[in-house]
Image (spheres, grey):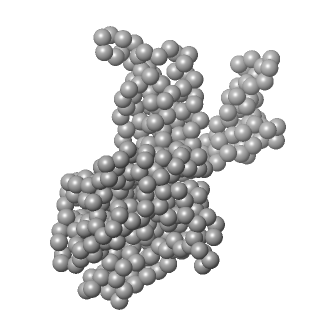
Amino acid sequence: MTAIDHIHLDALGGASGDMFLAALLDMRPDLGPGCIAAMRAAGLPADWEVTLAAHGDGTLTGSHVAITPPAAGKSRPSGHFAEIRARLEAARLTPAVCARAIAIFTLLAEAEAEVHGVEVDAVHFHEIADWDSVADITGAAWLIDALGAGSWSLSPLPLGGGRVRTAHGPLPVPAPATAKLLRGFAVIDDGIGGERVTPTGAAILRHLAPIPRGAAPTTLLAEGTGFGTRKLDGLSNVLRALAFGTAVADTGTDRVAVIAFEVDDQTAEDLAVGLDNIRALAGVLDVRQTATLAKKGRLASAVQVLAAPAAREAVCRACFAETATIGLRWRLENRMVLSRQMVETADGVPVKLVERGPAGQSAKADVDAVASPGMDHLARTRRRARAEREALGEDET
């Protein structure tokens, strides 16, 4: 099992939405079905084909993603940002993926609004309004969330040159909106012209907020190479993804997101309801509340939430929505867990069996399941002991 802490992107040929998808899916092809399902959930019509195929150019091999319309002609979604945002909000996407997709589209809309001098909600996407662009962005959001990398870094981006045809007429490369999205990024001129970074690619990279390369972990876990559609003279048109992190030999070890905050201005009754709602979220593993002394001598509740890394962003948003906290802390940690399974006794009591290596198995019956009306502490204790012995296959003595 591997835990990805950091992903580095090498933009040898450039960066676009399909190259980003291809690089990550070349590295993790098992994520392909989930990525495509997210595209469909965002509205990609069933007659649009999505293919992930092996690809090579005689120098490098990798993968290529193609999102193609039906031969009879393609339907086109509305290109207005406000309508695209509303459609994503109504889509059957997880809150985290929906928020990422909207965030990427928002970056594009803000850049276009600045270029054309219009309100953000009034922006009409011309070149990126087709379903393939919506699919690229939604698929990218899903993959970013599924991989759960704590940070990203990026090589210098090729600047390109010349002109590109747009609905507004010929524009210089990089296109004005792309140039605004790439402000602050390191760029190089490798002598090869054309559009090397697309607006969709630039928005995805801006959303990732890449850190300096030197801050990345040092253990290389996996790599993936994504090809773009264009052929470059003397250069492979690829975006390469390198995953760094912790290689874990023990199958009982994984990564967990730890989210912590304190609350001193919310009633105990309301906080309990909020924490129950957080506990019920997909990806949440545990919620713990303890008493602590906060500033000005106030008695406060210290809350710690454990969640799957991919659910971290959605859980953080829920913490803000369900509690009075205005700030929280989060980190990714390694954890080791023992193998366990749930079994049920003959009278319907669920029991958790845990493998403890040479020590054998332990058993724990759920207290709610052994309790019945009219049973006192001694009766519950005896019923629990019987259930646990039955689950372990031990004889009654």
Q: Nearer the viewer, residue 146 or 36?
A: 36
Q: Is residue 144 left or right of residue 157?
A: right
Residue 287 rendering spot, x and y as whole percentages? 51, 32
Along the viewing direction, whichever of 80 and 354 lies nearer the viewer: 80
**Is 66 above or below relative to 273?**
below
Front residue of this view, candidates 81 and 68 = 81
Residue at the (36%, 29%) spot, across then down: 327
Vertical side of 66 occupied by 320: above or below: above
Is residue 235 found left or right of 316 in the rendered image? Answer: left
Left or right: where 273 falls relative to 291? right
Q: Position of residue 217 (x, y in %)?
A: 27, 56
Asked whether residue 251 appears in the rendered view, the answer is no
Q: Is residue 128 visible?
A: yes
The answer to which quarter of the image holds residue 316 is top left
Q: Is residue 351 above or below residue 252?
A: above
Q: Position of residue 173 (x, y in %)?
A: 25, 68
Q: What's the residue at 69%, 40% (across, down)?
A: 351
Q: Is residue 62 above or below residue 374?
A: below
Residue lying farthest top? 297
The residue positioned 49% from the left and 69% from the top of the image is 29
Q: Position of residue 383 (x, y in %)?
A: 75, 29
Residue 140 horizontal side relative to residue 245, left or right: right
Q: Nearer the viewer, residue 139 or 144?
A: 139
